[in-house]
Every structure is written in structure tokens, then in C-alpha cells.
Image (spheres, grey):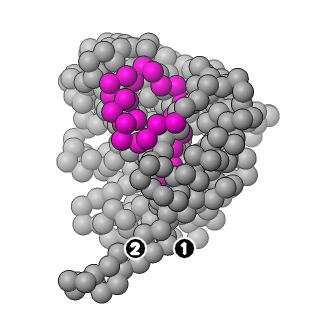
């Protein structure tokens, strides 16, 4: 955790609301940030960027050519969501999110998963206070590489090749992060693999995990094949503490975990550069949800929890704890649960309730 800045120098937050409900939940998160910042006397400044699929449709690019340089001075980036009908998902992803993650070496994607009091998990036996885990996803290499191509497009013999890239440095640093994190929790790591079917990259992953684990004798660990692990995450979610996985495996497991927790609408994430040489980025796991955009019914808690993770990263753990406590209070009250949680509250009602708990 980085120390807070001294004096009155504000911490600079780059805000990218994005598309659809991203705009709505980011506005809610900013209100919560302002309230808790006032309470804890944390100076924050914002610079908002309209980079989105709407920009792509109007100008042919998700962000300007110098977009990354404009983000570089920020202390953190708060993102809403991107994606819109008419713009292929790979365009929005590779035109904005992946360049940010890779240019700023945000090699850790951190996704906490909890079953809160007041939230009914669709999984029988997944109880509040028992299911509390974190998925640590490798975020800049692995299966999501740019290496590959297509041959003979549109012909019966068309060929598509996609290369996965696993480096010793990349696997080592994500595994080290997971084990160090486990030391602050229940000292238990599960590694997601598929070395019985993927002949090169996954045995390499397993070897590096075992090598790095030797330096953490105080942390218990095991390895699970991804298919069995997905089943166990549903059948025994309370068993897990820290799960570490490759880019693809971590992506899938974290969304599965969010479903186990009751709603993807409350799920947060952090894209971290642990070296702090570059700004880290914080975003809810949910997408832009065009089907409900503009209706004022989106659940803002994923964005708000992401903002709490940002505060913790910036060196304000007490403020982050207050925000999470406000989230817990909202989820406990049936009157402030949105419809994805079986309630009827709209975005405004939830935001107002959060602010009441913080002011």
C-alpha cells in the first residue's frame, strides 16, 4: 500500500465512464468518493475522458492517439464499462482496456468475492461470513496475446491460430503476488491449471508455481485443474482463499465467483501495477448493459466497491473500510437492494443510502 500524499496536494483520478450503465455507476462512485474524501480529509481531483464506443462510432477510435500519455500522470484510473451494440467487443477491448493494462504494466487483476449478509447466493450452502475469497488473475500475457492470425478467410479451409504466451517473469510475479496476499488472509493458495490437456504452457505454469511456492513455507497451497476447480467453486466456495490463474482461467473463475456471490452487479476489480511506476485502474466487473442503460436501475455497488479498492491502493485504508461498511449496510436493508439482488431500489436510492452512511 502506498502512503497518502502529504500536504494538500490532491491525488489525481482519471475517470473514464465509458458506455451504457458505466456512465451511471461511475457518477454514483464519484459521489461516494467525494463524501468519504470529505470525511477523511483526502484531497482528490478528477479529470474525465469521454473515451467509449460512442467515440469510436463518431471518430473511429476508442481513445485519441495520445490517450495513454494523457493518462500517465494520474495516480489512479476509475473506469465504468465499455461496450455497445454495433461495435465488436474485440474493438472496444483492444482499443482501450488492453492497451491501458499492458502499457501501464497492470499485471495483477484482483477480484474479491464475498457473500454479504442480505444477499442470497444461488448456490445452496454459500453463506455470508463463510465465502470470502480473492481471484488473482494474470492480466497482461497468457492466452490473451496478439500473436496469431487467420488464413483463407471465408473459404472451407479457413484457419485461425492463436498463440498463448507464458513467460517465467510473468508467471513468477503473479504467483508471488498471490502468495504474499494469502499471507495477509488465511494463508491458502489454489493454482488453476490444465496441465493434463495443455501440453506446454500449463506444465510450465505448474513448475513455476511450485518453484515460487517453496519461498512461502508458511502458506498452504494446492493445484486444481480448471474444470474440477470450476465445479468445486460452486460446490465448496467456502473452501477457497486465494485462487491464482492465467489470464483466461482467472477471467472465467472471477465471473463464476461473482455469480456464486449473488450478482455480478456488486463485483469489483482492480488492475494493479504493484511496482507503482504507473497508474492502476479500477472497474466493476459487469459490462455496459445496454438493455438497462438510461433507466436508472443499474446496481452501483460494483463501481463503488472498485472505488474503495482504489482508495486502499492510494493509501487510505480507513476510508476504504468505511465505503465497504456502507455497502454492507445497503445490502442488509431490503429497501436498498437493486433488482439484480431481488429488490426494487434504483441507482439513485442506493447512492443516497450510501451517502447517508458516510456523511
Badge 1 element: loop
Give the percent coordinates (x, y) of residue 306: 49, 36
Q: Residue furthest right?
A: 6
Task: Choose top left, top right, bottom left or bottom right for residue 59.
Answer: bottom left
Figure check: 86 above or below 191: below
Q: CA distance from mark 2 to mark 1?
A: 29 Å
Give the percent coordinates (x, y) of residue 251: 43, 46
Residue 301 falls left or right of residue 74: left
Give the percent coordinates (x, y) of residue 23: 37, 47
Q: Is residue 167 visible?
A: yes
Give the percent coordinates (x, y) of residue 30: 48, 37
Figure check: 216 above or below 79: above
User: Foreground mark, 2 or 1?
Assistant: 2
Residue 75 falls left or right of residue 252: right
The quadrant of the picture occupied by the N terminus is: top right
Q: Residue at x 33, y 33 (%)?
A: 231
Contact between marks 2 and 1 (CB within 8 A): the answer is no
Please tell me which residue lies in front, 102 or 214: 214
Q: Residue at x 36, y 80 (%)?
A: 150
Based on the picture, tell me whether residue 226 belongs to the magenta stretch: yes
Residue 122 falls left or right of residue 44: left
Residue 193 falls left or right of residue 46: left
Q: Residue at x 52, y 52 (%)?
A: 202
Disc 1: which residue: 65
Task: Choose top left, top right, bottom left or bottom right for residue 180.
Answer: top right
Q: Which stretch appears magenta?
A: 223-247
Based on the picture, tell me whether residue 357 belongs to the magenta stretch: no
Badge 1 crowding class, 10 Å Cα cut-off, few under 14, some 14 to 19, many 20 or more, is: few
Badge 2 element: strand
Disc 2: which residue: 161
Please tell me which residue lies in front, 333 or 97: 97
Q: Residue at x 30, y 15 (%)?
A: 125
Amino acid at each position: 500500500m502506498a502512503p497518502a500524499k502529504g500536504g494538500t496536494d490532491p491525488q489525481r483520478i482519471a475517470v473514464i465512464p465509458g458506455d451504457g450503465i458505466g456512465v451511471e455507476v461511475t457518477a454514483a462512485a464519484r459521489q461516494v468518493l467525494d463524501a468519504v474524501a470529505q470525511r477523511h480529509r483526502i484531497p482528490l481531483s478528477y479529470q474525465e475522458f469521454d473515451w467509449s464506443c460512442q467515440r469510436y462510432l463518431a471518430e473511429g477510435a476508442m481513445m485519441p492517439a495520445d490517450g495513454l500519455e494523457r493518462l500517465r500522470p494520474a495516480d489512479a484510473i476509475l473506469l465504468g464499462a465499455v461496450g455497445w451494440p454495433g461495435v465488436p467487443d474485440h474493438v472496444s477491448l483492444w482499443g482501450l482496456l488492453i492497451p491501458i493494462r499492458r502499457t501501464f504494466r497492470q499485471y495483477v487483476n484482483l477480484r474479491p468475492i464475498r457473500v454479504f449478509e442480505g444477499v442470497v447466493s444461488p448456490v445452496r450452502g454459500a453463506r455470508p461470513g463463510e465465502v470470502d475469497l480473492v481471484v488473482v488473475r494474470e492480466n497482461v500475457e497468457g492466452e490473451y496475446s496478439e500473436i496469431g492470425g487467420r488464413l483463407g478467410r471465408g473459404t472451407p479451409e479457413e484457419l485461425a491460430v492463436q498463440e498463448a504466451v507464458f513467460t517465467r517473469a510473468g508467471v513468477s510475479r503473479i504467483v508471488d503476488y498471490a502468495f504474499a496476499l494469502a499471507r495477509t488472509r488465511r494463508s491458502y493458495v489454489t493454482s488453476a491449471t490444465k496441465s493434463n490437456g495443455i501440453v506446454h504452457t500449463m506444465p510450465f505454469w505448474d513448475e513455476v508455481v511450485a518453484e515460487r511456492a517453496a519461498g512461502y513455507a508458511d502458506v498452504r497451497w494446492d493445484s486444481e485443474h480448471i474444470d474440477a476447480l470450476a465445479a468445486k467453486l460452486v460446490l465448496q466456495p467456502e473452501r477457497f482463499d486465494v485462487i491464482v490463474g492465467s489470464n483466461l482461467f482467472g477471467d472465467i473463475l472471477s465471473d463464476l465467483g461473482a455469480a456464486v456471490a449473488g450478482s455480478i452487479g456488486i463485483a469489483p476489480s482492480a488492475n494493479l501495477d504493484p511496482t507503482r511506476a504507473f497508474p492502476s485502474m479500477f472497474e466493476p466487473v459487469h459490462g455496459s448493459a445496454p438493455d438497462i442503460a438510461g433507466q436508472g436501475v443499474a446496481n452501483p455497488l460494483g463501481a463503488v466497491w472498485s472505488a474503495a479498492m482504489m482508495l486502499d491502493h492510494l493509501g487510505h485504508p480507513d476510508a476504504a473500510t468505511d465505503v465497504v461498511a456502507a455497502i454492507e449496510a445497503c445490502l442488509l436493508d431490503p429497501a436498498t437492494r437493486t433488482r439484480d439482488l431481488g429488490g426494487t431500489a434504483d441507482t439513485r436510492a442506493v447512492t443516497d443510502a450510501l451517502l447517508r452512511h458516510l456523511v
